[in-house]
Image (cartoon, grey):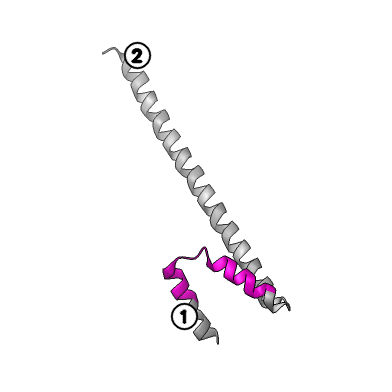
């Protein structure tokens, strides 16, 4: 093979590595942003549920949210209720 072809193959490999690193960084940034969003929204919901005086509304909101919780997480939440009193 000619030196030109070898140089191009080396450059292509470098570009692939740069692309993969950039794609991994972007994926990680998106994951961190989604995690932060979940924490912020969860904290806001918990605060609203703790401070809202309308107990019926809070109960409906809790029932709605619990429909989207896995059995494992639901068991954890129930254990926390017992600890929190």
Q: Left or right? Give the position of 80 relative to 45.
A: left
Front-most of residues 7 and 56:
56
The range drawn in magenta is 57-77
Q: Left or right? Give the position of 50 relative to 84.
A: right
Front-most of residues 63 and 77:
63
Q: In this view, does 54 lie above or below 45?
A: below
Q: Left or right? Give the position of 58 relative to 31.
A: right
- Name which of mark 1 and mark 2 comes first in the sequence: 2
- The image position of residue 68, as x and y in percent, is 52, 63
- Assess whether mark 2 and mark 1 are in contact (beta carbons under 8 angstroms): no
Tell me the residue that label 2 is attached to: 4
- The image position of residue 48, as x and y in percent, is 68, 71
Tell me the residue that label 1 is attached to: 79
Q: In which quarter of the image is residue 39?
A: bottom right
- The image position of residue 58, as x and y in percent, is 66, 74
Q: In which quarter of the image is the C terminus?
A: bottom right
């Amino acid at each position: 093979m000619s030196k030109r072809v070898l140089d191009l193959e080396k450059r292509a490999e470098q570009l692939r590595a740069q692309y993969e690193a950039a794609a991994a960084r972007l994926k990680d940034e998106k994951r961190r942003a989604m995690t932060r969003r979940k924490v912020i929204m969860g904290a806001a919901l918990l605060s609203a549920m703790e401070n809202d005086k309308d107990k019926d509304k809070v109960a409906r909101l809790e029932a709605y949210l619990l429909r989207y919780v896995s059995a494992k997480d639901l068991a954890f939440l129930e254990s926390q209720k017992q600890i929190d009193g």
